[in-house]
Amino acid sequence: MVTQKIKSKLGNKTKWIISVLAIAVIVTIIFFLLPGGGQKTSLSIGNSPVLGEENAPVTIYEFTDFSCPYCEAAEGANSQVISALQSQSSGWEAPVPLIKENYVKTGKVKIVFKYFPGHGLGGAAHAVAWGLKEQSNDLFWAFAEKAFTMPSDLNNINKMMDLAVGLGANETLLTEYISSGKYQYQMDEDTAMGKANGVQGTPTFFVNGEIVKGAQPFSVLEGIIESKL
């Protein structure tokens, strides 16, 4: 009789353990299947502008902001910041123009533009830029190069629109896009991706996943690119 009670208790305990394990398995499955569940956030191109060959062996994600002085310097603009950086390191060279010349044009690198609020004072410029991306990838990159040289006008929608139209943009389509507010979704999505991947300021580069923080000289990024090729 006692033995039977023990067996009964053991049987109940076994059933309880099996039930707990089953619940744990189900929870684990749900955790991994839900969006983001149990998965590390990774970088993805999505709807972002890309400069370079699709099959380039090295991908550089550039988290940047038109209104960030150090981003401007990295792009070869803002002579004041460039002078300051060169005073600290005599061999400092703006990395982005040289990457474009030496690696993008030769099909070895593609650059993915991602927004991250370094200063966050160029809302109008970024709205126009995303609108241009909807019309033409080339228009976006032409505009971006100009925007980095115009820090005092970045939040002036009229001047940014004039710049875009001067580059060949369809003004009607651009106005409709900006009025829709869709650009804010893109900016928010990029910012969230940056934060999830450890971006804390601009510029920040990821060279085939390897993070490079700040306006580092071309030589630093060149060495990393070469190591990835």
Image (cartoon, rainbow, N blue to C red):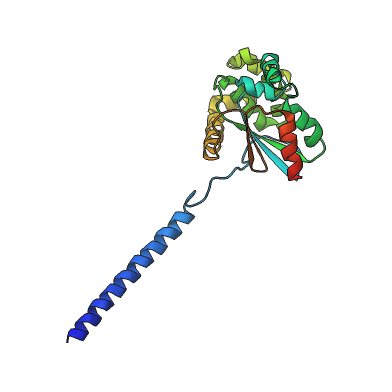
Q: Which residue is rendered at x = 55% and y = 24% of the image?
A: 179
- Residue 74: x and y, percent? 69, 25
Q: Is residue 37 above or below residue 192?
A: below
In this picture, is 19 found above or below 30? below
Question: Is residue 169 at least partly visible in the picture?
Answer: no
Q: Residue furthest left?
A: 1
- Please tell me which residue is depicted at 53% across the width and 48% down the height of the picture: 40
In front here: 61 or 91? 91
Count of numbered badges drawn on the protein: 0
The residue lying toward the viewer, choosing from 219 and 177, is: 219
Instruction: Tell me the residue at 59%/16% (across/down).
Output: 157
Quarter of the picture containing the N terminus is: bottom left
Q: Percent position (x, y) of residue 105?
A: 81, 35
Would you say residue 5 is visible in this rendering?
A: yes
Q: Which residue of the protein is positioned furthest toward the right in this rendering?
A: 106
- Which residue is pictured at 64% across the width and 26% down the height? 129
Looking at this view, is 126 or 11 the one in front? Answer: 11
Relative image position of residue 165 (x, y in whole percent):
70, 19
Q: Determine the image quadrant of residue 60.
A: top right
Whether residue 182 sits left or right of residue 106 in the image: it is left
Quadrant including the C terminus? top right
Q: Looking at the rendering, which quadrant does residue 26 occupy?
A: bottom left
> Seen in the image, is 91 located left or right of residue 124?
right
